[in-house]
Image (cartoon, grey):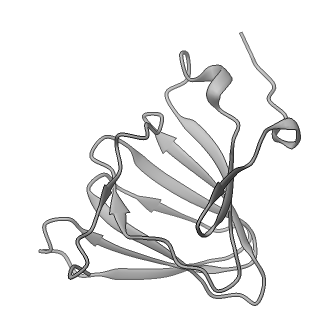
């Protein structure tokens, strides 16, 4: 049965780089994807991480960010793309990714993951990797 979820009523979860608003929890038992609205503060950068289980797409809403990606085995070259409003990048499983805000404002995006994101499916790089 179709479900409407209004993220304006959802609680923001504070993160070191900004905040996220997950608005997929009601449908996780049924959907084959999850959606989160993420806000990355001006000048922020995330910690490089990858997912063994999920692939992700970042869809730009406001501002801009550089997404840096590289395969966890280190054999594939690093790729960088700039995401702005109405653009998205697909990030396959097993690819490290960092978000670096490049605009003079916050970067907001939707993060769509399939299968649905699970907190245990985040693996962070060692300090000397990248």
Find residue 71 and report its image quarter.
bottom left
**Residue 61: % across, % down:** 75, 65
In the rendered image, the residue lying farthest to the top is 1
Q: Quadrant of the C terminus?
A: bottom left
85 with respect to 79 (left or right): right
Q: Quadrant of the N terminus?
A: top right
Residue 24 vertical position relative to residue 81 in the rendered view, above or below: above
**Residue 102: % across, % down:** 63, 88
Residue 115 vertical position relative to residue 37 in the rendered view, above or below: above
Find residue 7 and report its image quarter.
top right
**Residue 86: % across, % down:** 72, 66
**Residue 18: % across, % down:** 67, 66
Residue at screen point 76% across, 90% down:
104
Residue at screen point 46% across, 59% down:
90
51 with respect to 118 (left or right): left
In this view, the residue in front, 44 or 37, is 44
Residue at screen point 85% across, 34% down:
6
Residue 24 vertical position relative to residue 86 in the rendered view, above or below: above
Find residue 110 and report its image quarter.
bottom right
In this view, the residue in front, 42 or 32, is 42
Residue at screen point 49% across, 80% down:
81
120 with respect to 2 (left or right): left
């Amino acid at each position: 049965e179709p479900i409407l979820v209004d993220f304006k009523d959802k609680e923001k979860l504070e993160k070191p780089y900004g905040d996220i608003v997950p608005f997929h929890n009601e449908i996780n038992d049924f959907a084959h994807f999850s959606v989160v609205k993420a806000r990355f503060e001006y000048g922020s950068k995330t910690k490089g991480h990858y997912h063994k289980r999920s692939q992700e797409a970042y869809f730009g809403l406001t501002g801009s960010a550089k997404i840096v990606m590289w395969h966890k085995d280190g054999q594939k070259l690093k790729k960088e793309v700039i995401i702005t409003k109405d653009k998205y990048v697909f990030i396959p499983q097993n690819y490290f990714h960092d978000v670096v805000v490049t605009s003079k404002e916050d970067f907001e995006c939707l993060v769509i993951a399939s299968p649905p994101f699970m907190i245990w499916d985040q693996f962070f790089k060692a300090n000397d990797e990248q």
